[in-house]
Amino acid sequence: MTTPLSIPPDGVSPASDLSQQVAELQAENARLRAEMELIPSVVQEVIDEQMRRTSLLTQLAIEAREVLAPEQLVEQTLRAILNTMAIDASIILSGPGMQIELALHVVEGKLQPIDPTVARTVIEKGLAGWVMRHGSSVVLPDIFRDRRWLHLHDQQKMGCAIATPIRQANQTFGVLTAYRPNANTFNSQDLVMLEGVGALLGVTLSAARYQASERQRRDQAMTLLNMTQFLSAERSLTELAAMLNKKGSAVFGARWGLLFLSDEKDDPSNAVIHPVLPGPANLWDSYAELAAPSAHLAWSTQRIVSTNPVPDTTCLALPLTHHGLTIGSFVLMHPGKTGFSANIWSLLTVFTHMVAAACANVQLVGRLTEQAHILEDLVEERTQQLQRSRNALRVVFDSLAYGVVLLDAQERLVAANNLFCNTIIGRHPRELVGLTYSAVWHILETQPHVRIELIPGPDPARPELVVHVGKLPEQRSFTVRRTPVDSETDAGEQYLEFWQELHEL
């Protein structure tokens, strides 16, 4: 007798339950096999993505070694981001006072400059300005929902964005902004990648700025050296003012450099400074009038003065001090309200000392030249007076009725009147002056009809010398008497010799 199988209470047979479990296991096994087949492709995609990101940073690092110009660095960075990550990006670099130095962005795969007004608005009111002020990156999954987003063009009204600062050593140079047209398409890897690009760009820009600063310092030092060579030559104040205006603009980036000097002829209690214009008055009077208050204040207070006579111009007035005396001031007029770095201030100190010394030297040369002219006029006047006195003495000398000879201590003829030269010797005075007394006597003795004799005089011990010139009846006889004359110089004693005709005795 066969016993029937017992049926479970829930009405399910054990065979069907087993077959169902086997089917579920087979399905799970098939799913696991399918997933295992997908794992290599996903891993490969991750590896490829990481390689692309690594290649981007490597490419930028290699290019940064060859290029140090900020414009080229920014252009290469934007092109590399476009080629590697296929996103639109923009870079805005700003300087002191939020001035826009460079602004570029990618639009539909093309590199284009950003309008300066738009870039300034983005820095002042938009997301880029917020990132620069706070120094941290920002991710906007949906730009439509954030009021900080200011689009650069009409195609950026929808989508997502990442903004990261470009900085180095706590100094922020600008902002790198990446954009995609679809919302929520940036992930954490994109953020890390863009922050790495921003950090690398910050390092390269810092190096570029440092090199530019060193080049500028070298050029400024060479300019100051050239100034010393220029100032070593004699210059007029106008030439000096023109050179200082040119060098002030080249070295310190000023629009103009104006020189103001005090007049040394003025009473110190009432002295004022006057502008020394570097060019025609009709071109420079207005600038000098604008800078005059700052120049006078710096000169009177002997300290550096900075003023803003008009909204877009700053006047930096530097006193010029030489040997403790403030002789004037030099005014640099530059745009805006930007200041100078410590290096520029050190150059300004050297520059003002050089300018003060140069101006003092020019003024000294001017005074010496003026004194030389006065001395020349005085010498000319004294020479004319001496010539007039000499002419008057010659007239008196030649009008004497007897011959007169002046001899020095060496008995050389210094002067003689016409009667002695023409009548007695028979020579022009110019032929006799400078000859020795013996040479003059030799000329006299070689003439015909000349006879010399000694006759008794008032002193029996000293007979008088008589010279007879000519033949009878025109013969003339002269007595010769010598008298010593005290000299006013150290040349020794001089002598006057008188040749007096006998009929006058």
Image (spheres, rainbow, N blue to C red):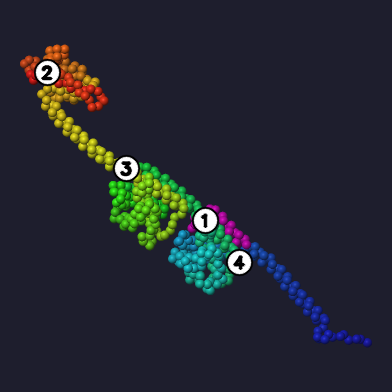
Which residue: 67% across, 65% down?
43
Q: Is the stretch drawn in magenta largely helix, strand or loop? A: helix
Residue 478: give its label.
Answer: 2
Cα distance, mark 3 to mark 2? 61 Å
The secondary element bearing badge 1 is classed as helix
Upstream in sequence: badge 3 or badge 2: 3
Residue 206: give its label.
Answer: 1
Number of residues whose C-alpha sits closer than 10 Å to that of mark 4, classed few (under 14), some (14–19) or many (20 or more): few
Judging depth in this view, the residue of 365 and 53 nearest the camera is 365
Q: Which residue is mark 4?
A: 188
Query: Which range is magenta?
Result: 50-72
Q: Is 114 positioned to the left or the right of 437 in the image?
A: right
The kind of residue on which mark 4 rests is Ser
Residue 365: give its label.
Answer: 3
Closer to us: mark 1 or mark 3? 3
Q: Is 398 positioned to the left or the right of 173 in the image?
A: left
Please provide percent x and percent y for residue 77.
53, 60
The secondary element bearing badge 3 is classed as helix
Q: Is 464 positioned to the left or the right of 30 in the image?
A: left
Location of residue 399 by image quarter: top left
